[in-house]
Amino acid sequence: MKLNDELRLAQAQFETRRHFLKQCTSGIGMMALGSILGNCTTDSKKATSAPLDLNPLAVRHPHFAPKAKSVIFMHFCGSPSQLELWDYKPELAKLDGKPCPPSFLEGKRFAFIRGVPDMLGSVGNFKQHGQSGAWVSDYFNYFPSVVDEVSFLKAMYTDQFNHAPAQLLMHTGSARLGRPSMGAWSTYGLGSENSNLPGFVVLTSGGKTPDAGKSIWGSGFLPSVYQGVQCRSEGDPVLFLSDPNGLDRDLRRKAIDALTEVNRQQYDEFKDPETLARIAQYEMAFNMQISVPEVMDISKEPAYIHELYGTKPGEASFANNCLLARKLVEKGVRFVQLYDWGWDTHGDGEGTSLEVGLRRKTETIDRSMTALLMDLKQRGLLDETLVVWGTEFGRTPMRENRNGKVMPFKGRDHHTDAFTCWMAGGGIRQGYSHGESDEFGYHGISGRTHIHDLQATIMHQLGFDHEQLTYEFQGRNFRLTDVSGKVIKEVIA
């Protein structure tokens, strides 16, 4: 069928009674329901509605003056043990090898522990560092030099003890699929300062993607233009970035302009915000062909920078991603998400053991994440860049005994009641530790902070009241923090 004939047929289908009765009957009921529920929405002055600007990534103003212009969120998939890295518990060492107290087990569910496990003291050795006197283990050699830049959250807790739901909760505010990610909310609320780069970029390392998959940087029910764009530090930075053979840039420009005109006409007819997203994505893809290869090329960085980060151009590594994160926020990218896989330390093998595997993994991040804070500070970017170190949950103070059998190496099971995250820069208090777990690192006893509290604080530093940054979907306003969350005011400078 010729293109003109196909177009006329498609247009005619929208105007025939047969098409209406066959395809639109369920829509009539939804229209009626929508008219009934139309007056049930919240005050429009208090809610951010779907964007109507023809450029959905246009710069927008937050609710109040922000402390941070951009966010770099480092997530370590699998959950490194806080008891080996950040949370010093000398009393736990006294119980090493002794049966777990019954009070720790009553009414509790664990991913793998069965029966009565033994307690396990920290494998790491702790010392105090910096003027703040923060306790940091000997797993880190570089990080103690910047410990006074950060605020620790020592009594974080979550609702999920399996990796995928817990990762979803951390990054989308819900353990179920379908909600927008934190980065998507940020670009929806703020837009992008650089029209040639995505507002939300994702970089992965460790050989695998997170357990929850790409949904944790998705846009959910927001227009798809707000989803994270995954870039690679090895090979072409974005798949299918180059023009096909025989198609030069001028011809590509004409094709984009033609598609934009068709999409504009469709938007004028149906007012679907996803059509605007499509226009913006075509334009962004065209601009990215020049800008992305340049910003993703770390080979031209000076030798002292490579020495600082421990980077090796051409590799897919966390170190390379840290350097890329600095370059991206320097170019105006709003939200940079780093995911590093391989931190699940159950002790069922050497690579997942606390004494060997965790030390090896920590060595791969220690130098580069320290360099990131130092580099941002020396460039004057740390004050306006919020850096977050996080994971999906914590680790038990008991040694894992999967199905009642002790693992061949030292390991810990998943734990929801107490773990550690930290934040730096972007208006965050320096050299501070908020919250405390009990003497065994089992439960938070003061300053407990939920995942939604962390999300509310990140949004606050970007200039948003997390309760007012909403999007209407299926008859009600949704937000990142669902129906809870409080800003952690103690860690704000």
Image: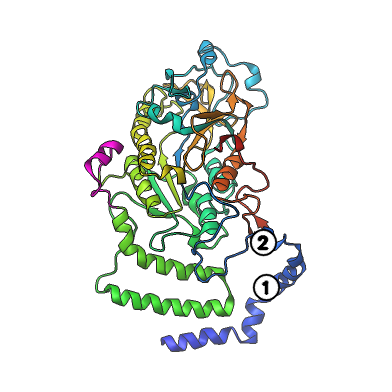
Residue 471 sits above or below residue 421 on the image: below
Residue 12 quadrant: bottom right
Q: Position of residue 286 (x, y in %)?
A: 36, 68
Please name the residue shown 51% across and 33% down the image.
151
Magenta segment: 297-312
Amino acid at dot 1: Gly
Please name the residue shown 50% across and 51% down the image.
183
Name the residue that disc number 2 marks.
474
The residues tagged by marks 1 and 2 sit, at their Cα atoms, a distance apart of 14 Å
Q: Which mark is residue 329?
A: none
Question: Is residue 241 shown to the viewer in this render?
Answer: no
Amino acid at dot 2: Gln
Q: Is residue 110 left or right of residue 233?
A: right
Residue 363 quadrant: top left
Q: Position of residue 269 (x, y in %)?
A: 57, 80
Question: Is residue 279 shown to the viewer in this render?
Answer: yes
Q: Is residue 435 magenta?
A: no
Q: Position of residue 276 (x, y in %)?
A: 51, 70
Name the residue that disc number 1 marks.
27
